[in-house]
Every structure is written in C-alpha cells, then in structure tokens.
Image (cartoon, rainbow, N blue to C red):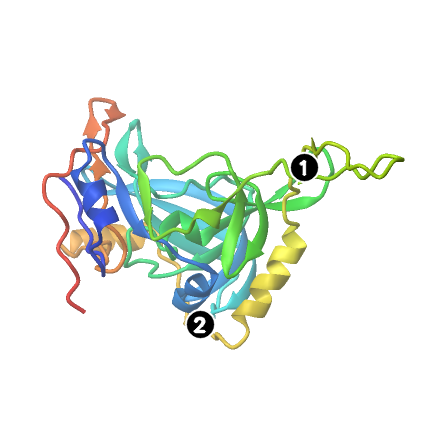
Amino acid sequence: MRLKLALTTMSAALMAALSSPGHATVLPYKNLQALVDEADGIVIGTVRSVQAAAARPHDVNTFVTLDQLELLSGKLNAPTLTLRVKGGLVEGRGLHVEGAPNFKPDERVLLFVQGNGRDLVPLVGWGQGMFRLVTDASSGQTKVQDAEGNDVVGLADGHVLRRAGAQMDEVVLLGAPGLQQAHSPKPEVNAGQTEDGSPTTLVEVQAAPQRAMSAERFVAEMRQRAAGHPGKSLRSVLPQDSLAEAAMGSDAAAPSTRQASQPVAMPEGEGVSLPMPRTTPPASDAR
C-alpha cells in the first residue's frame, strides 16, 4: 500500500527527488506568510495526550489533544482541541508517515492548523507548521524550536532562520531558500594600525553562537502576523469519529490534493518497514 498526494507544481527539483534511489516525502516550502494565510487557525497549546488508534487493520491514526489553548486566529468553542495525524503504533504494529511531526506529552507548541480530519497531517506544510516552545535548562528562558528540535534564531525577509542541525529525514522541501539554515560565521575584522601608521594583519574572530529566539518574541511576531486573519472554525477529531467513519466505509483521512507526494511504511511482523520505493510520479493538480 502507498498513499499518494498531488502537488500543485512539478519542477526539476521534484523530478530529481522522484527519480532518486532513496525515498522522500516532497513538500512545498512554506514561508511565514504562507503559514499564516493557509492556516485554518494558529493555536498555542499544551499537549495533554498522544493516543494511537487503528480504524482498520494497518490503518493507524494518532490523536493529539491540546489544552491550555490560546488562539491567535481561528475559532473553537471547546477547552481542548484534538488533531488527527496519520500514522502511529498500536500494540507494536502501525504505520509510519515520513514528514509527520512527533508530539510529546506536556510540551508547549504553536501550530498552524489546516485540514484537521481531512489531511494526513493537519498542519500547514506538515512539520513546517509546528514550533515547540521549550524551556532552556541552563538559562530558564523559554525558546523556540522547529519540529525537528532545531533552535529558531530569528526571522528574516518572511522566513524562519534555524540554527543548522537536525533535518527531516527523507523529506524534500521544494523551493526552500538557502537562508532557512543559519550558521555562525567567522568574520574577518581589521585589528587597527600600529604606532607608525601601518595596518596590522587581518585576524579572524569566531562569532558568538547565535542565541535562540525567545518564545515571547516569537509569539508576539506571530500574533502580529495573524492580525487581520480571522481564520476558520476548528473542530476536534476523536478516535471514535474515525472508527465510525471506518464502519461506514468512508475515508475522511484521504490524501489532500494540496499537500505532498509521500511514501508510507507498512507493518512487517511486530515492527514497521521502511518506506516503499516510488515507482510513478504523483498526479499533478490541474487547478
């Protein structure tokens, strides 16, 4: 079994990813404006529970429930929000979706929610639409990390700057700019002049490590960007909802035609296999 999603564009980068011997989830890159514009709602919350449930054999969803909510955009008439994410493990067997972020109980997150109950991963750009608000053990300050645990060090020209580090395994971000990864440079500076007026030799100075962006500043920026974007009504999707849909023969988690082309790992024995190789390119979206 392999789930396929359509992309709105086909480019040389996408074709290269499809023709490579490896396996990759291909996702269109989302800058900050796209994250805000495409979100049904921008939600800050604490992960209260992470529960996997099988609607049918080999069809597993993970249900992530958030509480202590703050909505920067969107509407919700409930104290909690439950998101349905394709994949997960039930009794040692399950489904793995490359590019789907992992949630941890009790962590504080900022999410750009889109298509809950419709899309495989109900976030704009999948992992691109998730940011973790983490308390730094050494300083006690709350900082921002992306879905892969990389520190966010700032925002520039509508893009998120991340300290170079972990990357999403088997994920290709189509159209991502080079400045998405931020490195600490070693600039050259002039040390001045000697007493006789001759210049001294240029010396290298190691730049100080870039500090992670504070959660307060990041949230303030997102709140400002969300102004004027009322969003849509959000709803929770619960395990019993998926079980009822499965019993009726529906497939509410059918792949969205806007999201990505991605392979899905299927169970083998008591574990989960690697993604299966891609044999045909995804159908293009004719919109």
Label 2 is placed on what type of residue? Gly
- Going by the image, does 156 lie left or right of 123? right
Quarter where residue 124 is shown: bottom left
Quarter where residue 135 is shown: top right
**Residue occupied by mark 2:** 231
| In the foreground, 191 or 278 | 191
Give me the C-alpha separation between circle 2 and circle 1.
Answer: 41 Å
Q: Residue at x 32, y 37 (%)?
A: 88
- Going by the image, does 13 lie left or right of 126? left
**Residue occupied by mark 1:** 207
Please tell me how many numbered marks the rendered image carries: 2
Badge 2, how many Cα within 10 Å: few under 14, some, many 20+? many
- Going by the image, does 266 lie left or right of 108? left
**Which residue of the protein is positioned furthest toward the top in this rendering?**
269
Do labels 2 and 1 touch, CB within 8 Å? no
Q: Quadrant of the C terminus?
A: bottom left
